[in-house]
Image (cartoon, rainbow, N blue to C red):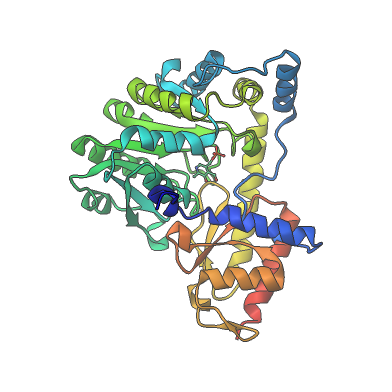
């Protein structure tokens, strides 16, 4: 038994969305006209000024190791940006820049969890959270909410999930996969719970710029001084600036936690990509018009999606208020068949839809949303119309 895979790695479920991307790319390579509603990334190109800043960084020779937690000017720019937007008071030393929100999320969990510690996880939630919690030695304690509750947990359900092993609550607003946006009252209730039980709050706000129809993004850290002190906010450039491939994200929090995360990062990866850091600096300090332009495009597409889903009998959804996903409920289609294949769950629905109508969506089960599928509307309007036409045709052909 000398050469075995560790328990940590044995228990990791590979990302279902990345696996789906690989299948879609394979089918595209075969020349098939697949419409991908699975990906979690804006279809827009990274704005020109940001790309230009990266080119300048290369020409200026900014291609060497940097400080492991990010160059000082970027840490300062992140603090200034967040303080200006939300009236907060972060110092640059309370900012960690890492290789994507993904990396800083893992580091936050590693920094605060000991083996067996529990993290309260409101769900449906992003499928990476439970894996990340386990990778850091913790245990997710899932608190489920439903479409009828607008996919927001009740304060009582959060309270009931607290045990002597609870160390943190991990929230995500706006939410992937539901598009739910936490209101101030619920944030306050979760914040009070954290204060009462002396818990950390990890607040993933990566979709913060993407809120619609009058909804407002309220950062958890703005709820009050005691909540500010215990909140580790996670965000980044991927969604707001269409910079998914640049792999840059940040965390904000108490200096001791940020230092601990930075120490881990300094050994695990070292600094995030130097060129991407200068691009990210331009993103935060340059013209912000493209952020609003993209938000408006997503809002228009969301409305289009809601109209088209509303026209398909047997499916339903709770209107999302943020991010760029709709969680479509297919419960009423379970038990029906497509060309002799019974739809027994969302996985089978997803496979049959991809096989027969060349539309890729993600099944809800890994997000704790069984009998649902997640549709991403980060694709062009005409593709949305065609994808929904194919889905409607598929549903119509069920027996
Ligand atoms: C909720 C949530 N957090 C974090 C991320 C990862 O962001 P990044 O590209 O900065 O690693 C994603 C990406 O899909 C996400 O949906």
On the picture, is 332 further left or further right than 274?
left
Residue 222: x and y, percent? 37, 29
Residue drawn at x 67%, y 37% is: 293
On the picture, is 212 further left or further right than 138?
right
Residue 264: x and y, percent? 42, 28
Task: From the viewer's side, name the closer residue of 81 and 61.
Answer: 61
Above/below status of 392 relative to 186:
below
Task: From the viewer's side, name the closer residue of 9 and 181.
Answer: 9
Quadrant in the picture for the C terminus: bottom right
Rendered image quadrant of residue 310: bottom right
Residue 198: x and y, percent? 22, 35
On the picture, is 238 further left or further right than 203?
right
Residue sticking out furthest to the right: 31
Q: How many marks?
A: 0
Residue drawn at x 49%, y 36% is: 103
Q: Could one spot residue 223 in this view of the protein?
A: no
Rendered image quadrant of residue 109: top left
Task: From the viewer's side, name the closer residue of 44 and 85.
Answer: 44
Residue drawn at x 54%, y 78% is: 343
């Amino acid at each position: 038994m000398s050469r075995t895979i560790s328990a940590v790695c044995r228990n990791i479920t590979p990302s279902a969305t990345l696996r789906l991307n690989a299948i879609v790319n394979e089918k595209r390579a075969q020349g098939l006209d697949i419409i991908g509603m699975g990906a979690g990334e804006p279809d827009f190109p990274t704005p020109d000024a940001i790309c230009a800043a990266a080119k300048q960084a290369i020409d200026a020779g900014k291609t060497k190791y940097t400080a492991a937690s990010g160059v000082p000017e970027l840490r300062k720019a992140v603090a200034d940006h967040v303080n200006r937007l939300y009236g907060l008071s972060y110092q640059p030393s309370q900012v960690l820049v890492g290789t994507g929100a993904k990396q800083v999320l893992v580091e936050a969990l590693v920094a605060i969890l000991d083996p067996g510690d529990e993290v309260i996880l409101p769900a449906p939630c992003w499928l990476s959270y439970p894996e990340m919690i386990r990778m850091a030695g913790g245990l997710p304690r899932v608190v489920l909410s439903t479409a009828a509750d607008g996919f927001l947990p009740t304060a009582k359900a959060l309270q009931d999930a607290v045990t002597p092993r609870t160390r943190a609550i991990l929230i995500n607003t706006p939410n992937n996969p539901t598009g739910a946006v936490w209101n101030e009252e619920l944030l306050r209730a979760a914040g009070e719970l954290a204060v009462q039980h002396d818990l950390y709050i990890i607040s993933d706000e990566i979709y913060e710029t993407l809120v619609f129809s009058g909804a407002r993004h309220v950062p958890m850290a703005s709820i009050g001084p005691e909540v500010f002190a215990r909140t580790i906010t996670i965000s980044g450039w991927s969604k707001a600036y269409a910079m998914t491939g640049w792999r840059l994200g940040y965390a904000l929090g108490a200096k001791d936690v940020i230092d601990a995360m930075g120490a881990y990062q300094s050994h695990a990866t070292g600094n995030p990509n130097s060129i991407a850091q200068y691009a990210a600096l331009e993103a935060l300090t340059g013209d912000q018009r493209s952020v609003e332009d993209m938000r408006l495009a997503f809002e228009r597409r969301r409305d289009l999606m809601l109209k088209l889903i509303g026209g398909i009998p047997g499916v339903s959804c709770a209107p999302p208020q943020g991010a760029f996903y709709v969680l479509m409920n297919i419960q009423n289609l379970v038990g029906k068949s497509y060309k002799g294949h019974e739809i027994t769950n969302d996985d089978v629905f997803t496979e049959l839809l991809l096989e027969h109508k060349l539309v890729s969506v993600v099944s809800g089960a890994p997000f704790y949303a069984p009998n649902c599928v997640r549709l991403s509307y980060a694709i062009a309007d005409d593709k949305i119309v065609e994808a929904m036409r194919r889905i409607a045709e598929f549903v119509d052909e069920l027996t």
